[in-house]
Image (tube, grey):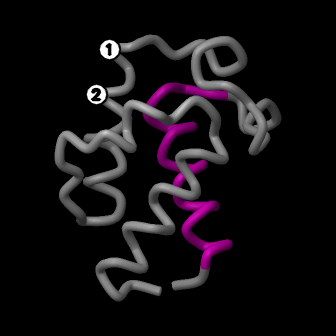
Amino acid sequence: MTEQEIIERVDASLAEEFELDRSIMKPEATLFDDLGLDSLDMVDMVIALEHTFRIKIRDEEEIRKIRTLSDIHRFVIGKARELGML
């Protein structure tokens, strides 16, 4: 799996989970202001990513730092590297 494939899967997963218009899903889009998510949606986001990538995401401090779609991409790419998926 390539970094671009991960980005595409993240975007597809979040678009489906939260019924987001893909046209607003730019890397710089903020989760709360631009995408309209709230703090409870963050829990659903973690579950969706765990399901999509078949990984476990523990209560990591990195999750609390996520503010943009690009932050999610970097986080999942980092996880994929840690797990040897890249």
In the rendered view, would you say 82 is above or below 84?
above
Badge 1 vs badge 2, beta-carbon distance below 8 Å = yes
Q: Residue at x 74, y 31 (%)?
A: 29
What amino acid is found at the position of numbered circle 1 in the picture?
Leu
Q: Amino acid at mark 2?
A: Val
In magenta stretch: residue 14: yes
**x and y percent of residue 86 in the render?**
47, 86
Q: Secondary structure at mark 1?
A: helix
Decide whether residue 21 is among the magenta residues: no
In the figure, is residue 61 to the left or right of 3? left
- Specify the quadrant of the image occupied by residue 45: top left
Residue 56 rendering spot, x and y as whole percentages: 18, 58
The residue closer to the viewer here, 11 or 27, is 27
Residue drawn at x 24%, y 65% is: 54
Residue drawn at x 50%, y 38% as measured from the top left: 16
Front residue (pair 66, 38) = 66
Q: Secondary structure at mark 2?
A: helix
Please state the total of marks drawn on the protein image: 2
Q: Which residues are magenta?
A: 3-20
Can you tell which quarter of the image residue 42 is in? top left
Q: Is residue 81 above or below residue 12?
A: below
Answer left or right for 68 relative to 28.
left
Q: Which residue is mark 1?
A: 40
Tell me the distance, in whole angstroms, between the alpha carbons under discs 1 and 2. 6 Å
- Which residue was labeled with disc 2? 43
How packed mark 2 is, by other alpha carbons closer than 10 Å (few <14, some 14-19, many 20 or more), is: few
Q: Residue at x 42, y 79 (%)?
A: 81
Mostly what secondary structure, the magenta segment? Answer: helix
**Residue 49 image point, x, y percent:** 36, 50
Determine whether, in the image, residue 6 is placed left or right of residue 21. left
* Mark 1 neighbour density, 10 Å: few (under 14) some (14–19) many (20 or more): few
